[in-house]
Structures are given as C-alpha cells and as structure tokens.
Amino acid sequence: MRRWLDIVRLRWRSLSRRGAADRDLDRELRFHLDRRVEELVAEGCSTREAHDRALREFGSPSSVAEQCRDTRRVHVLQHILQDLRYGARVLRAQPMLLVAATTSIALGVGANLTIFGLANSILLSQPTARDAGDLVHIRTTNGSHVSYTVWRELAAADVIGGLAGYDIETDMVWRDRDASVTLTPLLVTANFFDVLGIPIALGRGFTADEAAAELSPRLAVVSDAFWRRRLGANPSVVGTAITLDGAPYTVLGVLPADLRSLPGYGFMPDVYVPLSRTLIPTLDRIRATHVQLIGRLRPGQSAASAQAALGAVASGVAAQYGDPEAGSIRTVAHVGGLSQLKDFEQVALFFGVLLIVTALVLVIACANVAGLLLSRAAARRREIALRLALGASRRRLVQQLLTEGVLLAVLGTGAGLLLTEGFARLARGLVIELPLRVAPQWSFDARMLWAAAGMVILSSLLCGLAPALQATRSSLMPGLKQDAIAALHRRFHLRGWLVLGQVTISMLLLVITALFLRNLGLAERLSPGFDSARTVLAQVTFVTADAQKMAAVLDSVRALPGVEAVSFAAGVPLTMRYGGESGMHMRIDGREQRVRVDFFQNDVGPAYFETMGLRIVRGRGFSPSETTGTPRVVVINEEFARRYLEGLDPIGRHIYLPQRAQEESAQIIGVVSDSKYRTIGEDRSAAIYGAALQHGAARFTNIIVRTALPPESLVTPVSAAIMRLDASAAVSVEPMTSALRFALLPSRAGAALMGALGVLGTVLAMIGLYGVVAFAVSRRTSEIGIRVALGASRATVMRLVMKEGGVLVAIGVAAGLVLALMVTPALRAFLVADLPTTDPVSFAGTALLLAATSAAAIFGPARRALRVEPAVSLRVD
Amino acid sequence: MSRPSDLVQGTLDLLILKTLAREPSHGWAIAKRIHLVSGEVLQVTQGSLYPALHRLEQQGWLKAAWVETEGGREAKVYSLTAAGRKQLARELESWDRLSAAIHLVVRNAEA
C-alpha cells in the first residue's frame, strides 16, 4: 500500500514539477560523467581526451535522459495533452476540413441517437413509478388479462409486494358543454396508485379504500395533456366533477407532463378511472377478462419465486371458481427493459433493422472523414517523414494522428447530440394518427449517454485509425523527396477502398429504401377488398346501450338524401381494434377432429355486406329478425371455407364457437368475399361474422353509410342525424378512406424513416466519391498537363478521370447488389405480400440511380481536369 | 567488454537490487561494484543503468536521496525500500530456479 502511495507521489512530482525532475536527472548523469573523466585522468589521459572518451562511451546523454524520463510513465499523459493541443491547432488551421468532418459525423451520430432514443423510449424505458425496477407483468395461461374476480383473489392472498391491474380496451364519453368526445381511459384497480406509486403533479391519486369497484366509485385522475388541452390547465379543476358517460366523476389529481405511462410504447391514456360495474357490467363474470396484471415484488423477491407463490394461489382460485385457464401463472417478467421486447416483436424487429441501417450511415460518414484525413495525411507526408527521420516512434505518430480523429469524433458527436435534440423537438410536435394518444418521450438517460460514448469510440477508430496507420507505414525516402507520384498512387488506393466500401453500403441502403418506398406505393394501391371510396364511417359511443335507440339512429341516417345503405358493426376492418382469434381448436360438423383455426371475427348488422361492398358468394347475409334468443347464425368468408371446410358444403353446416363457459353452436348461413382485416399487406385470412343483433345492444358501435354522393358531403348530415336522437353520444364521422389511415401507418412510417436514412447515406457517400475523385485530379494535375501538352484530346483526359471513379462505382454497385440480395429476405415481415424481397424494380432502379448520381459526382472534378492549362500545371510542384 | 544487450533486463534489475541490498550507493558506484564483483566480466553501461534505476524507483522498489559524497560533490544515492527487499527475494528465487534449469539443460545436452 505504501509503495503505491510512493508511486503516485513520484508520478505526480514528475508531472507537476517536470522542470525540477529534469534538472535532477541532468545532475545525476553529469555526476556519472565527471567520475568517469576523473578515472580516465587518473589513468593518464589528458583532460580533453578523457572528456571525449567519456562522452563517447556514454552515448547520447539526451537519449539516456529520454529513456529515464519514459520510465516515469507520465509521458503518456503528457503526450496526450500535447497531442490534443497540437491536434486542435492543426484542425483550427483547416476550418473547411473541420466543418466537413464534424458535419459528416454529426449527421451520422444524430441519425443513430435519434433512432436509438426512439427505440429506447418506446421499447426499453420503464414506466414512471416508485422503484419501477420491482414492477412485473404477470400473465396466466389464459393470456394477458384475467377476470376481476381472479385479480381480487390473487391480490387478497398478499404473496407479493402488491398486485394491481388495468384495462385499456374500453372507451368513455366525455361531455364538454355541448360536445361529446370519446376518450381512451385507463380503467384501473382501486389499489393502482397505492401499488405503483405514480407521482401526481397536482392533487392526489385515489386510494384502495375509496375506489373499490364494489363502491361504484366516480373518481378520476387526468393526464397532463388532457388537463392542458381540454380543461384549460386550470388548477382549481381538482376537486370538481367532469361528466364521463353521463355521470359526474370527481377529478382528484393531474399526472405529471413527462409521465411514461404504464401500458408503455408511448400510449398516453387521457384519464385514469377505477374499474366499476357501471363501466363494465360483466365485471364479475369469471370468464370476462378485464384486468391486465401488474405486480410489485417484495424487496429481495425474485420473479421466479413470485411466480411460484402466485401460481399456488392461482390454482386454488381456479378450482374454486371453475376457470381452469386462470390456474397457472405463465410468466412474471420485469416491466421495461429487454423483457418487454417479446411483447412487440414486430416493432422490435423494425427498430433492429433501423438501428443497423443507421449504423451503416454512420460508417459511411466516418469513411468520409477517414478519406479527408487520408488526403490530408498525404499532404502532410513531408512533415510526418521528417518527424520519423528525427526519431519519433511510429506508435507516437499513430497516437498523434488518432488524437485528431478523436477530437473530430468528440466534436461531431457533440453536434450530433444537438441534432438529436432538434429531431426530438420536431417529433414532439408530430401527431401520430392512432385512435389512442401516442407520444414518445425522448429522455437523455444513462442508456443514451452510453450510446453516445460508444459512438465517439467507434467513430474515432473509424475516422482516425486507417489514416494514421497508412500515413506512418511508408518508408522515409519518398516522403522526403520532392516528387512521389508512385507513393501517392498507393495512398489513393486506400482511399479508393474507402469509397468502394461507401458505394457498396449506400447501394445496400438504397435498395432497402427503395423496397420500403415501393412497399408504400403498392400498399396505397392495394384494394382492401371492400368499398372504401363510397362509404362513410361514424364511430359512436352511447352513454347507455339501447337497442331501440340504435334502430332509430339507423332509420334516421337511412332517411338522409343520397344514402344507399346503412349498417353497423362492432369492428371496422383496417382500424386498430379489429378482433381475431388464433390457435383455437374448433369443432366443425362433418370433420372428425377439432380443427386448429385462425380467423378474424366481427359482429355485424343486417345489410352489412351490401353496405361495405362485400360480395355474398353463397347463401345470404343477416336479417333484422335474427335477434337475441334466436338460434345463432354466422357468415364466413371464402378463405375460411377453403381452408377449414375441405370441400364440405358450408351452407346450413354447424360450427362450434367457444363462448364464455362452453361451446356455442352456430349455423353458417352465407359465404362472402375475402377482404383485408388488420393490415393492408396481410395475406388472405379467414374470417367469421356474427350477427350483432343476436348479442344485444352495445355502447360502442360503428355505423357504416354507403352513398352515391361524395362521402365528404355526408359527414355533417350523418353526425347531425345521430346527435338529434341522442345528444349525449360521442360521435366522430369521417369518410372511410380517411378512417383507414392506420392501415397505412406502418408502411408510411417505414417508407419515411428508411427513405430519410437512405438519402442521407447516399448523399454522404456521394460527397466521399466527389472528394476522392477531386483529390485524384488535383494530384494528377501535372500529369494531365503533360498529357495535354503532348497532344491528348479532351475526350482522352475526360475518359482518364471518369475511369478513375467509374471503376470504383461499378465495383461498389455490383458488390452492393450482391449484399442486398443476401440481406433483403430478412425484411419479408415488413413488406406487403405482393412485393418480393428481390423486387427487380427496386434493385435495377437503385443501381441506375446510384450510377447516375455517381457520374454527376465524378463529372465536376473531371471538368476541372479539362480546364488544366499545360503551362500552368507543369509548374505545379 | 560486455554490451548491455548481453544482460537480460530482469537480470540487470536483480544485479542492482542485490548490490543495493549491501549498502545504499549512487549509479557510478553501482556500476563499479557490479564490474568488480563479477570479476570484471559484466560492464553495465550508463545507457541501461540509469533507465533501470529510474524504472525501479518509479516502481517503488528503490528510494533516492541527494547525499554529499567524498570530494564534496552531491550524488543521487539509491537505497532499497521494504518493497524492494521483497522484490529482491522474489527475483533471487526465480533466478535460482532459472539458472538451475539452464544448467540442467546445458549439461544434459552435452552428455
């Protein structure tokens, strides 16, 4: 220990009092020399002779001193400081280089951090809550939700730190004076705020005692956005009531603005309301699953032990209430972080692709900087050769040149961070067209800082290492000599490789971009399978469900001028909440064994198929007489018949739908044409339609209006007709085409992001190409001059220069195409079914585009070469 | 005359530590003593001696002080620290092992 203290003291001394330490060293060596001189004199030499001999034996005193100094180790630090000062001076002296390099890196880093930040906020961030690291998502074999009863029993067992639940699948109507607005509330268990410890900006959250569902609580906590936009940011709103679903709810508190909500992925519910039987009449049914579980682990409790403890309770609950599927706990996973990725594989995958693409953009940007430094290193050859000749070690020079790379990387990353903040601000103003409020939150958390630090390291290595090694590899002589054409060609060679790599990567980027753009183009032209051009959609939320009122509403809409047909449905295809079942085993009459089926499901009214423009292939649609109490009937689509009925005649056949407690027999009365259900790019899917009238009235419904007039002209009349009958209903009417925006959102987002990155990458690569050709031309000025003087034609010179870049581009494009062929199959999941990942239009188009852009980039310097005056150019160097 | 390259670096460290274990001395005296004790076979040149001394000092095995010598001149006198003593013991042990091993190989190879 003492020894280490000594070492630190000595190093500090040699660093802080360098002069004193050096004087000591001089004295010590001089003492030695003097003794040798004395010895030689004693042996009989003359003083002068003795002096000379002693010095000869000693060797270079300064070299010995240098070696002694090196043992102090602090030289590493000194050298770094010295290099930083020198590098800063060099860069300041070349503002163009500084600006070009910093901009390049900033663009690359900015793109990377933006995408990483987005992925971080959407996929990895934890919700805002007390000790969010202890929170876990709990799933049963039943799926993500359990019934209210199961939650109550599990929570009462008290085997973990706390167990709450929430539900985001119900809408509420908020009455604002004369207008009604549909809100997306988060329905939560009474103990939600107690268990999660979510901070409240104003007022307070509700407690388990006052909000129990059994008390029919009318309490609400509102989001900051709702408070600001809808309640005028009025602090005195706390304690007053707002009208939700026709009843007064007391506002207890307002959530903070930067809240990361619990459902995650940027979803921002407007209002938090306790679960109650008023809101969900089926709350007490054991098979009505309304509660998504979220638990808090006890201090020191592991997810596995919580799973075991909950599992033991759950099997008891399952036995008691006869719900076997609630009986086992499938997963207990920490909220946020990587475990969250499994839930949203497609989104995670998309971000994976994005991150790889942005990393490639950064590589291109760094290759530019490396190219710039290389050509500068070529210009500095004499300086470097001189320093090598004077005895600077190669390692030392590499360190010096790397330091310049690090300086540029730090500056570039700093600028990139600013750029990211700029992007983030832009994105905050972005409204994402989803039925739910989505607002990604960028936050510069530890993960972002690590990412930025990683980028500094990566870009310094990419920018600095190649030029540094290259610059110091050459032997001394050509550098010291005046002309060094041969050596220059070698150097151009390395830059050539850099540009080759850039062209290859940008080719790959462009192919990916082209695929996403083509995808958007195709997706926009894809037919959804139903008539969206002549229909109007009214989404209606009634305060109370009432079959008679519904019938009256439909009648009044039907009576409007220009209306051809009116129907309604629980779900509208290609909007967010279209239902479906997958992996269910269904009994079908005529087939011996249960069939594993995947299908989309919707409950629709009479005349739905005619209104939507779906063709009835066989049988008939639903009639108004099929209401509650009549035997259940269904209509299937062609794909369902083809896939699961194996040639059996569908009409009149019974299938058995697992509903509630047991299977329910339903007779097939018709077959309709296929359409798209959830995404525009999906393959043919099976579908079953139930008769909405057989399920009784619903609070939330979609009224679909078919018209011969332009759909826009019906928006106001339809809205007015509904409001006349029920002023308390929340109504939103729009042409069907605009309601389908969500269907194209993934394609649009993909095309926009990939398009931007592809363009950015290619622009950077073109700058690199321009740079390398311009550099080559400027270096060959005298050669070109000689050629022109000897009678070379303009065409010859042009060919000469074009060849220089053309070869690089040709090889790069070819390599990029091959690489793209290998890589693009991984993008299958993001593209519509009709677009092959080897789409020839994308591949050939991109190759042509890149070739044309490259030709333009080469043409500039080539023209300059043509203007070379032989007399002038021969004087160069 | 033996060149410094004949001396493996570790060996020079061992020679210096061993010499200083007897009594503190300055660089000149250390070189002289090694020359003398080795039967005038080993000659440590300044070019390797002083960097070695400084390295050992930086490692905390030697400490140095300016002391007035005979003739009234000040010289930088090195002495072993406690850590240096331990290091000497370690180096001696490894030297013994190494020289014994080399001896075995060389003799057996001749036989």
Image: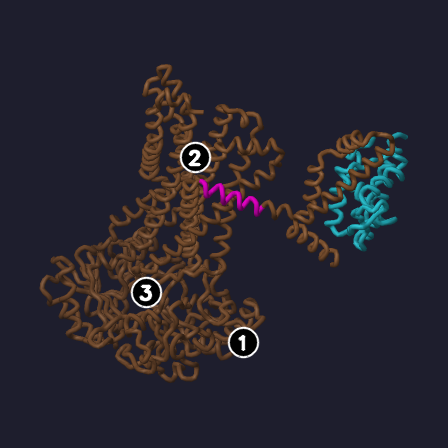
Chain colours: A brown, B cyan
User: Cα distance, mark 2 to mark 1?
Assistant: 62 Å
Across and down, in percent, residue A557 comes to: 14, 68
Answer whether residue A178 is magenta in the image: no
N-terminal of the two: label 1 or label 3?
1
Q: CA distance from mark 3 to mark 2?
A: 46 Å
- Asked if residue A310 is positioned above or below residue A107 in the image, the reply reads below
**Label 1 sits on what residue type?**
Val
Q: In the structure shown, which secondary structural element does the residue marked by tag 2 occupy?
A: helix
Side of A534 relative to A641 (left or right) = left
Q: Label 3 is placed on what type of residue? A: Leu
Residue A192 appears in the picture as rendered: yes
- Name the chief secondary structure element in magenta: helix
Q: Tell me which corner region of the image, top left, top right, bottom left or bottom right, holds residue A42.
A: top right
- Residue linked to disc 2: A499
> Does label 2 or label 1 sit earlier along the sequence?
1
Q: Which residue is mark 3?
A: A436
How far is the residue under mark 1 from the one under mark 3? 34 Å
Cβ atoms under marks 1 and 3 closer than 8 Å: no
Is residue A92 inside the magenta stretch? yes
**Residue placed furthest toward the top:** A790
Subunit of label 2: A
- Location of mark 1 (residue): A159
Task: Please report the residue visible at 37 percent of the width from the left and 69 percent of the height from the top.
Answer: A257
Chain assignment, label 1:
A
Q: Secondary structure at mark 3?
A: loop
